[in-house]
Amino acid sequence: MNRARGRRTAASAVLVSLVVLAAVVGLAWPRIHGVLSVGTALERTQEPRPWSAAVAAPVLPSPTATPTPTFDLTRHSTTDPASPWVVVNKQHPLPAEHVPPDLVEVEGVPVRQVAAADVAAMLAAARAEGVALELRSGYRSYAEQAAARDAVEARRGFAHAERYSARPGHSEHQTGLAVDVDSGSTPSCNLQTCFATTPEGVWVAQRAAEFGLVVRYTEQNTAVTGYAPEGWHLRWVGRDLTAWMTANGVTSLEEALGVTGGPEYAGG
Ligand SMILES: [Zn+2]
């Protein structure tokens, strides 16, 4: 009798405990669930936006760039050949005699001093992450561009050269602010469209902007720039402008700075 009542008492205690537990969890569930939901939402907003989706992506706070509403896009000239923001394309050539006044060397490659520290920092950052980014070329004189263009035209024909190789005076390399980079891991893709798919090409597409450089010719901006995609060709414009471009989903200097471009050469 006592043992039976003891069992009943124990059973009742377990039942009461379960009811209390269920009540507590039931009351607390919205808070527990809410905390979990907020955590997931935060993780979502902190995901970096893919480079290629920048234009179509909804406006989200960017963890790396802090756009200033008053950022002055007219701060530097786009026509002065020595300006950090000079825009050189098929509509806007450089004078044949223009030579940058402040060329220095980064790993044996000539670039303007104003860009040198950022180019070196980019190479160091890539290598620190195991990405075999190599500097191939920088400043090219008018005469060197003329020879390079002639070589492409002789090898691949006029139409190919028009898409991939600037006529002399229309190459950004003459500014001393453009560099071509190589893939140490996949050298067969150097200066080839497939460079963009190498670890080095993927890295520069995602990270060069942090160092003030833009991948100048991409799939998205071919009509605006007038050039086929060249994942290896980087142009230094400085970190403030690349931060603004990243934050606003703008991929071309023409769109950022309001300069005409396109595939037709000025004067035909
Ligand atoms: Zn180039």
Image (cartoon, rainbow, N blue to C red):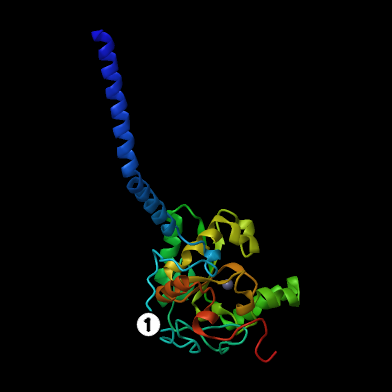
Q: Quadrant of ligand 1?
A: bottom right
Residue shown at 54% from the left, 59% from the top = 202
Mark 1 residue crowding within 10 angstroms, few (<14) / some (14–19) / many (20+)? few
Q: Is residue 33 above or below residue 267?
A: above
Residue shown at 47% from the left, 66% from the top = 208
Residue shown at 28% from the left, 10% from the top = 4
Q: Is residue 227 left or right of residue 249?
A: right
Residue 136 placement: quadrant: bottom right
Does dot 1 land on a helix, a strand or a loop? loop
Q: Residue furthest left?
A: 2
List x then y, in percent, for residue 156.
74, 71
Question: Which of the image's four quarters has the N terminus?
Answer: top left
Nearer to me, 157 or 255: 255
Residue shown at 64% from the left, 81% from the top = 146
- Give the residue pinned by disc 1: 70
Q: Is residue 63 above or below residue 5?
A: below
* Amino acid found under the numbered disc labelled 1: Thr
